[in-house]
Image (cartoon, rainbow, N blue to C red):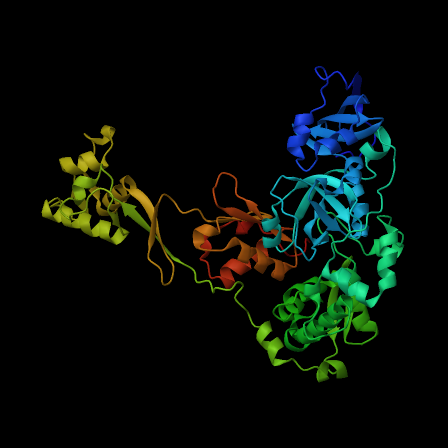
Amino acid sequence: RFVKPGMDQVSIFSFRRFLSKTISLPYTDISAAFPVLTADELFELVPNKEELNVVKVYAHKGDAVTLYVLNKTPLFFELDKHLYPTVYVLWRFPALLPAFTTWPPVLQKLTGGADLMLPGVVVPLTGLPHVNQGDCCAVKVSNNRAPVAVGTAALSSTEMQGSGMKGRGVCILHSYMDTLWSVAFGDKSGPPSLPDSVETEGDMNESECDPENEMQKEDGGVEVQCQEVIDQACTGVAELNLPDHIQQDDEKTTDGDQRSPQELMDALLFQCFLHALKTKVKKSELPLLTSTFLRNHMFACCPNGKQLDIKKSSYKKLSKFLQTMQQQHSLIRVKELTKGVESLVEVDWKNPELRSFCVSEEAICDAEPVQEGDVPYHPPEITTVYSVCPRVEPLFLDAQKRKGAVLQPAEVRSIITDYVKKNELVAENNKNYVMINPTLCDCLLEKYEYHDVESMKWDDLFGRTMSKMQECYQIVFPGQEPMIKKGHLDPIDISVTLIKNLELYGFDPAVVSTALQHRVQASSVLQPLPGAKDRVLVQIQGNQIHQVGNLLLDHYKVPRKFIQGLEKAPKGGKKK
């Protein structure tokens, strides 16, 4: 990224373009990388006999970059053998790259070094532009076709939509107002105003309600004039929160409610607050940490199909909301029992608002534990089994079990017991021991034991037999045929932010990811699992080992022995 001023080790050399045998301008590469450019447009971009500079620079992270500069204006830059256009080229040819649209306040974050996150992408009526992961693409602001940034797609268009428009969308390489634009080269001109003919549903609704407001936005271009709008822009790189008046249509109710998304979220927040006080909080629990009250009680009272998000309310913070409930409604009393940590210390159970609040039947049903996902999950039955291998095959011939036969541990014990009794190998003096005959010697003993071991206990005999067999595992899902696989079954591995091996236990990682998002109100994405084909891992923000463990153990009923990493959960309690 060209986001920090100052580039070192710069070497510049120039040549005349009309000497076709000596020029290094990659016309072939440009045509291959940008097939939409015609020959006439390419020669219009770099007129004949114009002086062209090739500039070798090192970005602040040490990346070697080759710039192609015409009259002090960078046209293209080459990074890792890939060619990218600058915003100066895109302003002349806006349709050169597939472009994602975002809101003007997000531009401030992009120019500060942030990547474009999917929550900040405006989805037009025609859908997202078609890209594959790693494709070169542009970013433009709404109502202006002039791109303001260039980067690579972090996901394909299909994967973006499949992720619920969460996570990283475009990895930004160069943007308007970065070092490449303003310090090293360039005429420092701003993007032209090119009216965008592609409208979103939000644009259509706003234009119907207030045409003058739409014209004002077009005239504004990419300049962010209103500080109030900037304050409503995203507060961090990890998540881009859109201004309230341009929230997506899926946040609007379907019954014709004309309230703004912010007002709807305020109402939902108050409803969940009263519901939690009336049905969840007990007097014996007080004092109760406000964070625990929100996570364990208010979120649990959120109706199905809705998501409680304080950031989208007018309060923005839990502390401000609770102060309002205390000062204006006299419902609760909040106190800072520990420095910096607030607790709910008192509830006015006789408050008229609380007493008159009625929990609807729908809310009662929604508050009950629900199965995340469309298909109810039932834990599989997992057992260790053993496969007959060539070394121990002679012990199983009488039972008609050949190489590759899969046996339960009880079957192995039964067959070995029958073999011992049939060959009269039980020790006469002590029936707890079995005499070793030549067949048992070849199958179970090591060479150095041939002359030393003459007998062994029954448990040692069974243990040695199964240790010489191929260990397998059988997994049976309700209503399905048993599946037998060789080797050891890896447990579900939980690290601080990663969960893997869910597929081995019949989970859909996307369903688990969505369930965790609803439980902890944190971003969760799917990432490819290194070294494993067609498998992914769930990455969630923050240390959520407690919540992941509760979901797997209590909700999905996965046996604890098949979960690894629960011991890494943060320890609770106060230090004395």
* 48 relative to 37 in the view: left or right: right
Residue 25 at x, y percent in the picture: 72, 23
Question: Which residue sits furthest front?
Answer: 40
How many labels were placed on the picture? Answer: 0
Is 305 placed left or right of 195 in the picture? left
Q: Is residue 272 above or below residue 87?
A: below
Residue 293, by quadrant, is bottom right
Residue 294: image location, x then y, percent: 69, 65
**Can residue 392 be spotted in the picture?**
yes
The residue lying toward the viewer, choosing from 48 and 6, is 48
Q: Is residue 373 left or right of residue 523?
A: left
- Residue 447 occupies quadrant: top left
Task: Using the image as rendered, state which of residue 150 and residue 273 is in the foreground.
Answer: 150
**Residue 60 x %, y %:** 76, 29
**Which residue is found at the position 80% from the left and 66% from the top?**
208
The N terminus - image quarter: top right
Residue 315 at least partly seen = no
Q: Is residue 473 left or right of residue 138?
A: left
The residue at the point 21 percent across, 37 percent down is 443
Closer to us: 484 or 201:
201
Give the percent coordinates (x, y) of residue 563: 48, 52
Quick check: 487 above or below 264? above
